[in-house]
Amino acid sequence: MSESLVNYQCVDDVAIVRLNDPGALNAFSDAMCELLIERLLQAEREARAIVLTGNGRGFSSGVNLNVSPADKPTSERDAGERLERLFNPLMAVIHNLAVPFVTAVNGPAAGVGCSVALSGDLVVAAQSAYFLQAFSRIGLVPDGGSAYLLAKSAGRVRAMEAMLLAEKISASQALEWGIINRVSPDGQVLDLAMDFARRLAAGPTHALGLVRRLAWSALEEKFVDQLALERRLQCEAGRSPDFVEGVAAFREKRIPRFGGVIPLEK
């Protein structure tokens, strides 16, 4: 597995993860996907927030089709095998991260690359970036959680438009649809993402991780079940030293110094 396919560094308690196959617009090979999973799990252990972006002109053009199930006989062809083995585990890792996750979309985000880009807790995009559900162009259905992410954020009708027509969604249109948070001038998207990530890393990161759980759960659970989950997670958050520090800082009219410490007793 080539280490160069996913670059990793930690700056100011923020892990910066970069997809790094710019010649292929950071198309996902098996090796890149496996390494991205490793780096995200490493970042979860070592950092207080994560930023994911792509090197070169694009975020990710989707799956690398140089090796494709289409090359196999029909009886041996399973286009879903790679999902089960790689992309579903990747999206599950993102879903379950214990720290905030920001995506900085610096160019095209297509196919499963679009899914990964839109899975950020905060999604920022360069002015020239675009999002593309390209699956119907090659006779496949959206994957990587695309239908879920789009329908939950943009609504069913707009999700249908994106997936059925396979047209580019510009950064400004994505902002209008409510599937991203900010648009930045070209060349400044990583700076904007880092500004967000540093703010999150300076916050009560254990509590922010619990907020992630609540937000994902809110898309799926019944209201009464969501209330019960809020009650359990509030109990856990309240046992963290960050809660004591936050209240003390409020009373003393100062900036809190959060440690992101997980409570010992649950």
Image (tube, helix red, strand yellow):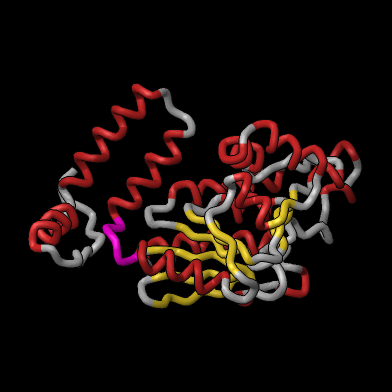
Q: Quadrant of the C terminus?
A: top left
Number of numbered discs on residues = 0
Q: Could you say where residue 18 lies in the image, as x and y percent from the top left?
A: 58, 71
Q: Main secondary structure of the magenta part?
A: loop
Horizontal arrangement in the rendering, residue 167 relative to residue 150 (left or right): right
Q: Is residue 82 magenta?
A: no
Q: Is residue 6 visible?
A: yes
Residue 53 figure quarter:
bottom right
Residue 171 figure quarter:
bottom right
Q: Quadrant of the N terminus?
A: bottom right
Q: Is residue 203 magenta?
A: yes
Q: Is residue 86 visible?
A: no
Along the line of sight, the residue nearer the viewer: 80 or 246 = 246
- Compared to 155, does 211 lie above or below? below
Which span is picked out in magenta? 201-205
- Compared to 43, does 238 lie above or below? above
Along the line of sight, the residue nearer the viewer: 114 or 30 = 114
Q: Could you say where residue 77 lies in the image, as x and y percent from the top left?
A: 83, 41
- Compared to 112, does 249 lie above or below? below
The residue at the point 54 percent across, 59 percent down is 182
Q: Could you say where residue 79 lies in the image, as x and y percent from the top left?
A: 77, 43
Along the line of sight, the residue nearer the viewer: 140 or 178 = 178
The residue at the point 71 percent across, 56 percent down is 170
Horizontal arrangement in the rendering, residue 249 relative to residue 113 (left or right): left
The residue at the point 54 percent across, 65 percent down is 52
The residue at the point 69 percent across, 32 percent down is 157
Q: Could you say where residue 199 lies in the image, as x and y percent from the top left?
A: 36, 65
